[in-house]
Image (spheres, rainbow, N blue to C red):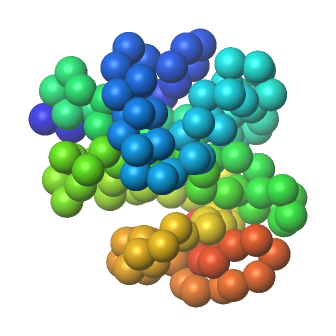
């Protein structure tokens, strides 16, 4: 059973497992998430920002967030998106992304993403279009 929960005050119990797996795979963006969260630098608190954790049962299976895009202030940026290997292709990543895109749609904002190696098909299947510039690889029009 997939459960999605917003992160408000603290990263959930079990987040360390996700963090360790991401680092072992060579992904540093979750380390950055933890460091920025711990320092208070980034808590996803600006208007329309949102951090979401996906659970499979009681296990932290994935994470994803939206922040104001650093280059295009009228857009949101999909950030810190990661799904643990054991939970890929189970619908958790898609559920996280769709909930975040729904949030962007409610705000009437474009969404950008910098797709990591091999992830472009995932984002394109969700309706993102390739748009390589200004630090992004893809864009999604959630304004309609």
Up the image or down, 34 lies above or below 69; here it is above
Task: Please tell me which residue is depicted at 24% across the width and 55% down the height of the picture.
Answer: 88
Q: How many marks?
A: 0
Choose between 121 and 19: the one closer to the eye: 19
Task: Please tell me which residue is depicted at 48% across the width and 73% down the height of the picture.
Answer: 117
Q: Is residue 51 left or right of residue 5?
A: right
Image quadrant containing the C terminus: bottom right
Up the image or down, 31 lies above or below 70; here it is above
Up the image or down, 74 lies above or below 31; here it is below
Choose between 27 and 128: the one closer to the eye: 27
The image shows residue 137 at horizontal and vertical percentages of: 63, 78
Image quadrant containing the N terminus: top left
The image shows residue 136 at horizontal and vertical percentages of: 69, 73
Q: Is residue 81 left or right of residue 71?
A: left
The image shows residue 9 at horizontal and vertical percentages of: 59, 13
Task: Please tell me which residue is depicted at 55% across the width and 84% down the height of the picture.
Answer: 129
The image shows residue 114 at horizontal and vertical percentages of: 62, 68
């Amino acid at each position: 059973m997939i459960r999605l929960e917003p992160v408000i005050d603290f990263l959930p119990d079990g987040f360390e497992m996700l963090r360790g797996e991401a680092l072992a795979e060579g992904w540093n963006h979750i380390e950055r998430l933890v460091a920025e969260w711990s320092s208070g630098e980034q808590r996803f608190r600006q208007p329309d920002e949102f951090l979401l954790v996906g659970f499979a049962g009681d296990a932290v299976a994935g994470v994803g967030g939206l922040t104001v895009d650093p280059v295009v202030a009228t857009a949101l940026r999909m950030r810190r998106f990661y799904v643990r290997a054991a939970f890929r292709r189970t619908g958790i990543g898609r559920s996280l992304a769709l909930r975040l895109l729904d949030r962007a749609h409610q705000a009437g904002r474009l969404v950008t993403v910098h797709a990591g190696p091999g992830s472009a098909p995932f984002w394109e299947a969700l309706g993102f279009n390739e748009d390589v510039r200004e630090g992004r690889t893809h864009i999604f029009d959630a304004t309609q």
